[in-house]
Image: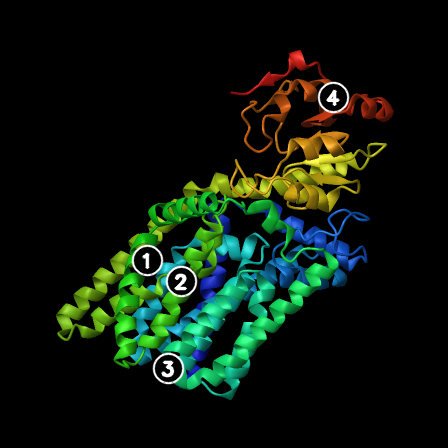
Amino acid sequence: MALDRKSADFLLALGLACAGAAIAWLLTGGLPAIGIDDAAITRSYAENIANGAGYVYNVGGERVEGSTAFLWVGILTLAYWLTPAPELAIILLCGAFTLTAIYITLRLVRALCGWLNIAPAPAVWILSACLAASPGYFMWSVWTMMELALWSMILIWMVYLLARLVESDGGRSNTACLLAAAALMPLVRPEGIVTALGLLILSGIIAPRFWRAVAGPVAAAITVFVAVTSFRLSYFGQPFPNTFYAKVSSDKLQGLADGLKYLFDFLLRSPFAEIFVAIWLGGAIWAMAGTVQNRPGARALLVTGAAIFGILLAYAALGGDHFTLWRFYQPIAPLMPIGVSLLIAGALSAAAAAPVRGAAKLAAAAAATGAVIIGWMQYYQARFDIRKEYALVEQGLSFGRFLNRIEPRPTIGVGPAGGIALAYDGEILDLLGLNWVEMAHANPVKVGMRNHASFDKATFWKHAPDVLAAFNRACAKDKSLAFWPHADTAFDGLFSDETFRHAYVPVAFLQGADCWPGFAKPEWLIRAGPGTAIKPYDWADVKVME
């Protein structure tokens, strides 16, 4: 019977993963199989490593860790070593990780129902309806090509293993798996070490008789973290990924204020998030009291709740980010509805009279249908913001291939730094600092666009690239140029500076129907021999968008 339940859960998880990915794709009008711009950055590193160039953004350039997910880079490196075009394989791998994360979540819900003496079937189906109402999770975990699916899978796996451990349902195999999960957490993301240690130590406190089983994974997590930090110090010269220095402000109060705004925005605007969190808050209080009273299931519920609140608070402390649909909170999307699933399933189990139970089931089905519709509508309304993340890659790839045909190849300064890195063979300077050590460290206090506020004018002028590529903006229909206003937060009003206007010329890069605006140094334009491919403009002819 246990094997049959596992098989049923796997088939349900498979159906949810396939349906969720398809719905996420359909509601946006189709997502290209190229991932988003940040994922393209990670892929460019993996491609360079696989080709023997090292962990670098520019081939022959400085060593820089512009991708936060160390393990994901290693996995993608293997993919690029096997094939020069691994896009489909990466999406399938993300789908497999997503499937596994959902399957483990279903197993966790069944286990919680068993410990809490709740009928599992209603909880499983309510959870499934909530997942079906969350296309944003499948967009982020399957289609973006980010490490999110891997992070979600490992995190949920650790929660499940610890839940079994604290409820005395573990064994040698469970302990071995826990060792593996603890070792992987710091490799997936840097904050994995804090997450792993927090969950392990909490489990050791609430179930002290299992301290030996917890001690090994704690040692494993610390050992791996020390090892990867030592590698970073020896290879890159700094203990954390360059993205940390580019994104996180040294002004902790400012970072916390930004992070709390991010958290409250998620709670107020993400469908049902405030309901899920409120139920988990009540569940955590019940679980703490139940742990003292040694109630079955209380410890497992407390571990699960700690993982949810830990992730919510950790990313608030780190300042949040700017991506659509609250990217940082998507890895715990499968865990969030567990509380409401258990609550409703428990209420159904408590309904003794058949007519009452039937009416409750009908009400639950209607509520689930409404939840799915609301979740899909919210995602559909965000489709333009979602597609913009993929459009950056498409624009970067097109412009990079075009620029490869221009001689001499210019050194280019860019904002979006992913798609262009996969296509352009010349030197690229990431003006936002994610892939440029000097720019990331130039100004520790970040002011401006959240997570993309590392631009520093002094550093820019020190290296002054031949071209500033604004390929993410299109020319006007009449091929005239229009640029954003001087108040642009990402580049500190650079384009309205008189110094900049003397040093650079507005240009349009032309290829058939395509037209990309940009700025170029006059001396490079002379060497490039401007013609039909590059059209210079007078500053007086440039429109400034308000």
SS under mark 3: loop
Label 3 and label 2: CA atoms lie apart by 19 Å
Going from N to C along the chain, the mark reached first, 3 or 4, is 3
Who's the residue at 41% across and 73% down the image? 202
SS under mark 2: helix
- Circle 3: residue type: Glu
Is residue 211 rendered to the left or right of residue 494? left
Going from N to C along the chain, the mark reached first, 1 or 3, is 3
Who's the residue at 38% across and 55% down the image? 133
Q: Is residue 246 above or below residue 347?
A: above
Please give the label number shown on residue 308: 2
Please give the label number shown on residue 167: 3
> Is the residue marked by circle 4 packed among few (<14), some (14-19), or many (20+) residues within 10 Å?
few
Kindly indicate the quadrant of the structure image that contains residue 404: top right
Question: Decide: marks 2, 1 in contact (CB < 8 A)?
Answer: yes
Going from N to C along the chain, the mark reached first, 3 or 2, is 3
Label 2 and label 1: CA atoms lie apart by 9 Å
> Which of these two is toward me, 317 or 145?
317
> Is the residue marked by circle 2 packed among few (<14), some (14-19), or many (20+) residues within 10 Å?
many
> Is the residue marked by circle 3 packed among few (<14), some (14-19), or many (20+) residues within 10 Å?
many
> Which of these two is toward me, 299 or 126?
299
**Residue 475 visible in the displayed image:** no
Instruction: List x then y, in percent, for residue 38.
Output: 61, 48
- Circle 1: residue type: Val
Number of the front mark, 1 or 4? 4
Label 1 and label 3: CA atoms lie apart by 24 Å
Residue beneath label 4, please? 503
Number of the front mark, 3 or 4? 4
**Residue 426 visible in the displayed image:** yes
Who's the residue at 50% across and 61% down the image? 18
Residue beneath label 1, please? 277
Is residue 430 rendered to the left or right of residue 544? right
